Image: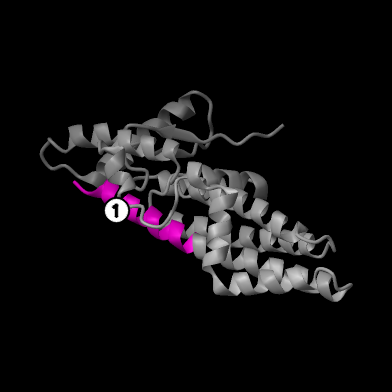
Amino acid sequence: MNKRFYYVRTKVDVDMNSESKKQNFSKEQTLEKLRKNCCDNLKKAGESSPKTFLVTRKDLGRYDFPLLYDTLEKDLDEHKRLALLMAMPTFSNEMLKKKRAAMEELIWMLASASCVGGLIPIPGLSLACDISILVGALIRFCKAFCLDDESLHRLSEKVGKPIKELKSAIKNTPMIKNITPDLVMNLLLKSTACVTLSLVELGLDFVPVVGSLFGGISSFAVTYFILHRFLQDVEVDAANVRAVAAQP
């Protein structure tokens, strides 16, 4: 079985800090020297054409980490690619855009699933399905954009800032522990369009065919609208957290 190997040289920032104290320091030459040294040693070990990536855990946006991610993204299948993307911290604006694009595709899938549930002619079932789908999706969005407690704690330790300071940048996104069916219901009630569609749907639940068709359409619209608006808030808050973390 053919396997791909990716060789990662970590703590490059330590080498760079050490070399920067020398006269005639050149960032490009130092990086090239590190890369060549890694490749030479790997070739001695029997690797004919090694791919070496220079990274630092302190700042994933520097050096070769973006290139490493792009390489993995090209080599992985669709499901593993999505899993990799969701596991990545939001270390750059480009990563935020990639996560947003992936979540927008997910919104269409979830809205379509909600539509299917809305077609079933059982009074109140589509609303229950919508709420269940929305709760799961909102939690997934928070985790994808690293706004969950675990991700914030890791970021706090990494940048040396109190987690309270990082959380202060989150203006619109609720903490995961607060994402419940009651919260989703409140989001629905705050939207005039969603309330109107839901009321009409409940009224038509007892009308054969028409009720089912409208139920599917309204469920799609409600799920899409709520998730799309929530995604916008999550992306903004994630960018705000990143900005606070980057402050000296």
Residue at left offset 49%, top offset 45%: 178
Residue 74 point in image, percent of width and height: 58, 50
Q: How crowded is mark 1: few (under 14 residues within 10 Å), some or many (20 or more)?
A: few
Q: Which amino acid does label 1 sit on?
A: Ala
Residue 77 magenta: no
Q: In which quarter of the image is residue 41?
A: top left
* Residue located farthest toward the right when viewing the structure as drawn: 208
Q: Is residue 27 left or right of residue 173?
A: left
Q: Is mark 1 on a helix, strand or loop?
A: helix
Nearest the viewer among 106 and 204 is 204
Q: In this view, does 29 lie to the left or right of 94?
A: left
* Mark 1, residue position: 243
Q: In which quarter of the image is residue 59?
A: top left
Color scheme of the displayed model: one colour
On screen, 98 above or below 81?
below
- The span shown in magenta is 231-248
Nearest the viewer among 210 and 138 is 210
Quarter occupied by the N terminus = top right
